[in-house]
Image (spheres, rainbow, N blue to C red):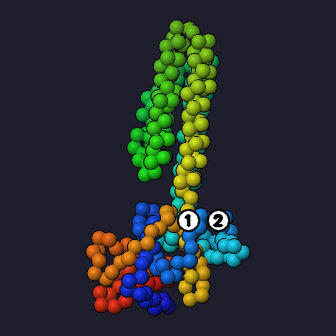
Amino acid sequence: MERALKSYPEHMPWAIVQAKNQAFAVATQDLREMVIMPEVAEVPDVPDYVRGVINLRGRVVPLLDLRKRMGLSSAREETESFCALMDQREQDHRKWLNELEASVKECRPFKLATDPHKCAFGKWYDTYHADNSWVAGLLKRFDAPHQEIHGIAIQVENLKTKGANEAAEQLIRETREGALAKMLTLFADLRELVRHAGRETAVILQNEGKMFAISIDLGSRSKSFSRGASRKYRPRCRSRAIVSSRGSEKGPRTGRWF
């Protein structure tokens, strides 16, 4: 049976936090502190939104994943999925250059994509939009070496036609040590940056003597919401982990807990 809604003072400020580009409000009278996400120890036989427990200065605190509680993919899952995709696209280009080299040594046509916009990475690159400005800036640096790698395919085929296989192999070696090496460094930097940008914050809450934490994407700010405030500036609050600032126009604000 769900617990009754909790009432909060009308003019109490609320901390606004974010999870997957959605804003939620947390009652500041229940908020104790916010910390960079520490190491999480998993706990068996719990709902998927219970990430595990964290050690807060010697105190074991349960950690709830706000995104998972809202039915969304977790920040950790999104980050690792992105990094796994970049791992695959990196391997694609290693194999692409190896196949080009093999086509020269075995005197056969090269059949992989020569257009940089038609390989798997190129198709992704042309349509992907990064919300993080640092990630977007780093991605722009992929364009030149990526085009250079694909651009040598036509040159290599022309050299093969002329019987200049040694020159073709030399061009491939130079590309492996130059443009491909740059791309591999960029892939490594991108994975590191995305993991750093995807770090979560743990919001420590205490209610009725019980302490727990929720994971959020970004930091929070304090802002007061009056009952007559414009609905435009009110946060979205749909979870029992997050308190609602809407309440009744004639009564105190209320919130629900897990």
Q: Is residue 87 above or below residue 256?
A: above
Pointer 1: what residue? 201
Q: Which type of secondary structure does the marked residue at label 1 adopt?
A: strand
Q: Earlier in the sequence, mark 1 or mark 2?
A: 2
Q: Is residue 48 above or below residue 150?
A: below
Q: Is residue 198 above or below residue 226?
A: above
Question: x and y percent of residue 155 in the render?
Answer: 49, 17
Any part of residue 180 in sight = yes
Left or right: 11 as drawn, with respect to 2: left
Left or right: 29 as drawn, with respect to 102: left
Question: x and y percent of residue 144 in the render?
Answer: 47, 30
In percent of the image, x 37 and y 89: which residue is there? 252
Q: Is residue 90 above or below residue 154?
A: below
Left or right: 138 as drawn, with respect to 127: right
In percent of the image, x 55 and y 62: which residue is there? 200
What mark, if any, has residue 47 been given in the picture? none
What kind of residue is marked 2?
Pro
In percent of the image, x 49 and y 26: which residue is there? 148
Q: Check if mark 1's residue and mark 2's residue have beta carbons within 8 Å.
A: no
Question: x and y percent of residue 137 in the render?
Answer: 46, 42
Pointer 2: what residue? 38
- Give the Cα distance between marks 1 and 2: 9 Å
Frontmost residue, 166 versus 171: 171
Query: What is the crowding at mark 1: few (fewer than 14 residues within 10 Å), some, or many (at least 20)?
Result: many
Query: What is the crowding at mark 2: few (fewer than 14 residues within 10 Å), some, or many (at least 20)?
Result: some
